[in-house]
Image (cartoon, rainbow, N blue to C red):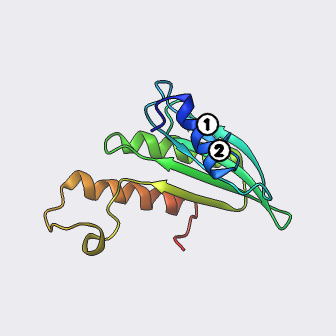
Amino acid sequence: MFQNISLIKNWQNHFRSKLDLISLAQQKNRGVALYVKEKIAAKQIYKDRKGRILIVELEINHKKVAIVEIYTLNGGQEQFYRTLKNIIHIIEYDEICLLGDFNAITDKKLDYKSNNIKKEQEEHYQKIFKMAEELNIQDI
């Protein structure tokens, strides 16, 4: 996503927000970023080395919320969600907002142009729902 540091600096000047909330792969060819208003207290809790997971704590109205931003690959989701689930258990927040690119089809009618859904794609969104159920995460 970010190819070099000059691009990051340009983005930082353009958005004028906290850009230290980034999880980049070591090759800097992919990653996730979260832009937070300067007025909101934010600190990075966790980032992985692959640029797939970023967890940021926000304090809003004296309440701490964990923002978990992810980018899921098309393959290897089972291991990814197992790792993510373990991380979410470790951070122990009452309020968690999970967002990002899940690379999943959750509603065949809305999300996919074809009726020909591969078995692996169907299994992928089932893994998301299973993890959400185990962590008591609600889709709102």
Q: Residue, x 56% and y 34% (percent of image)?
A: 48
Q: Residue, x 26% and y 70% (percent of image)?
A: 108
Q: Up-down: is 94 above or below 13?
A: below
Work out which quarter of the rendered image holds the C terminus and state it. bottom right
Query: In this figure, which residue is indicated by the disc labeled 2?
Result: 13
Amino acid type for the residue under numbered disc 1: Lys
Name of the residue lying farthest toward the top? 27
Q: Up-down: is 43 above or below 118?
A: above
User: SS class of the residue under badge 2?
Assistant: helix
Residue 9's tag is 1
Amino acid type for the residue under numbered disc 2: Asn
Q: Are marks 2 and 1 in contact (CB under 8 Å)?
A: yes
Work out which quarter of the rendered image holds the N terminus and state it. top left
Nearer to us in this view, 38 or 105: 38
Q: Residues within 10 Å of mark 1 (few under 14, many from 20)?
A: few
Nearer to us in this view, 9 or 84: 9
Give coordinates of residue 112: x percent, y percent: 24, 66
Which quadrant of the view contains residue 106?
Answer: bottom left
Give coordinates of residue 123: x percent, y percent: 29, 55
Q: Residue, x 61% and y 49% (percent of image)?
A: 14
- Relative to 60, is 121 on the left or the right? left
Nearer to us in this view, 101 or 10: 10
Q: Up-down: is 132 above or below 44?
A: below
User: SS class of the residue under badge 1?
Assistant: helix
